[in-house]
Amino acid sequence: MKLMQTTYPLKVQAIRSKGQQPRLYVSFPLAVAAAIGLNPGDEVQWELLDRRVLHLVRLQTRPTTTKRRAVKN
């Protein structure tokens, strides 16, 4: 079975407030958030695996709200 990989390029944004160090923000594409069930207010943290790889970890998962299960083919 071959897995299809989809990429979502984005840019890191800098927010500069007067008298403060710049803060960096990464926006999360809605399609990816929907695919993994990520919601506003979910707590996540980044794990740095190496200089090129960040791993996003959800700290708590919410129970699923769907009544039906996916069918395996």
Image: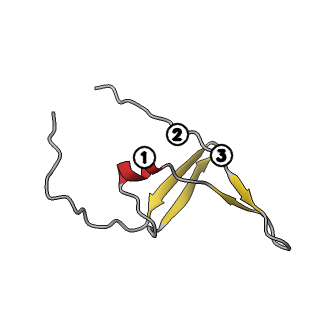
Residue 46 is marked as none
Number of callouts: 3
Q: Residue sitting at 73 percent across and 57 percent down?
A: 14
Q: Quadrant of residue 67?
A: bottom left
Q: What residue type is labelled 3?
A: Lys
Instruction: Name the image quarter holding the C terminus.
Output: top left
Q: Label 2, label 1: how many angstroms apart (C-alpha)?
A: 9 Å
Give the labeled residue for mark 1. Answer: 31
Mark 3, secondary structure of its residue? loop
Mark 2, secondary structure of its residue? loop
Q: In this view, does 22 lie to the left or right of 56?
A: right
Query: Vertically, is 34 above or below 17?
Result: above
Give the labeled residue for mark 3. Answer: 11
Q: Residue sitting at 47 percent across and 68 percent down?
A: 43
Mark 2, Cα crowd under 10 Å, few <14 / some 14-19 / many 20+, is: few
Q: Label 2, label 3: how many angstroms apart (C-alpha)?
A: 10 Å
Q: Percent position (x, y) of residue 70?
A: 17, 45
Residue 8 is marked as 2
Query: Vertically, is 3 above or below 69?
Result: above
| Mark with earlier residue (2, 1) | 2
Q: In which quarter of the image is residue 64?
A: bottom left
